[in-house]
Amino acid sequence: MPSTPPSVAAKRHAFKRLHQSGCFVIPNPWDAGSARYLQTLGFEALATTSSGFAWSHAQADGAMSRDQVLAHLREMVQATDLPVNADFENGFGNTPEAVAQSVHLAIATGVAGLSIEDATGNANDPLFDIPTAVARLRAARHAIDQAGGDTLLVARAENFFVGRPDLPDTLARLQAYAQAGADCLYAPGIQTREQITAVVQAVAPKPVNLLVGSAIDLTMKDIAELGVRRVSLGGALARTAWGGFMRAAQLMREEGRFDGLAGAASGKDLNGLFRAG
């Protein structure tokens, strides 16, 4: 007989436990099929990717509406037995009140965690000032606590992603977010051992998420030794899939060759995978 899927509460509990010790990979599927496949490989949790989801709808990252993202979160939660962390962008609101409302809606989708960025979306002024960012994060924390407090809150300092690679400011932001109630801290775009160590030490003992968006020299063993608790991939898996698709299509169109299909997955294997699910 099919096993009973774990409850939302059980998945949230398991997700929090993952953040207590060790170092784990939390890969980022972009649709139900990629989520289901990653589950079969034995990963312990998954995270959505705003960019991968947007590209699958012919949109740029950040262009999807809150309603579209919420529908996507519900689909992803239903697609897998694993805890799902939501890439919830900047909370879909500039004010603390708007962020709280958005977080309340996200919690209702069944996600085990959600991340809130401090990016404004305005190229001329890309980051909320620290007091505003803290107020928005506290509103997210309050919304989670009102709902029972079992959804993990991840706070992101976007300095390195928005062209402001100021490490001291990044550290000040992450420390302020930790004090405001974030359960896990995240500075996407940091790359060097020195940067990673500085972030880990700045917010200890709270866990840190490291983004690995491309091939790097560090192994999971190296990353764990630096004190990182979890490793996410952002849109990297989606970009990898797009890369294979684009190369195959370009070869056919420009050179009349079909070499790009050589690495294609077997239709039989894919049908077997999803029948089993």
Image: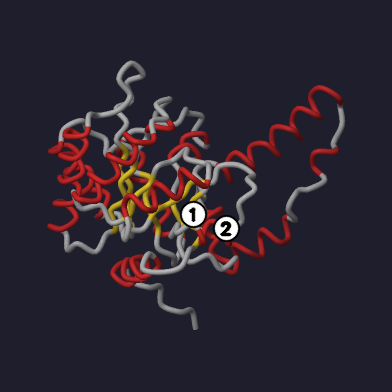
Q: Are dots 1 and 2 in contact, CB under 8 Å?
A: no
Residue 250, percent from left and from top: 76, 27
- The residues tagged by marks 1 and 2 sit, at their Cα atoms, a distance apart of 12 Å
Residue, disc 2: 222
Q: Secondary structure at mark 2?
A: helix
Which residue is rendered at x = 21% and y = 44% of the image? 137
Q: Residue furthest bottom?
A: 1
Q: Earlier in the sequence, mark 1 or mark 2?
A: 2
Report x, y in % for residue 31. Answer: 50, 48
Task: Please state if 30 lies on the left or on the right of 113 as rendered.
Answer: right
Q: Secondary structure at mark 1?
A: strand
Instruction: Determine whether, in the image, residue 191 is placed left or right of residue 48.
Output: right
Label 2 CA crowd tier, 10 Å (few <14, some 14–19, many 20+): few
Q: Nearer the viewer, residue 217 or 89?
A: 217
Question: Which residue is drawn at the image coordinates 87% and 31% (left, top)?
Answer: 257
Q: Nearer the viewer, residue 197 or 154?
A: 197
Give the quarter of the image for residue 259: top right
Residue 128 lies, with reference to residue 204, above or below; the image says above
Q: Which residue is mark 1?
A: 231
- Give the amino acid type for the residue marked by disc 2 in the picture: Asp
Determine the image quadrant of residue 77.
bottom left
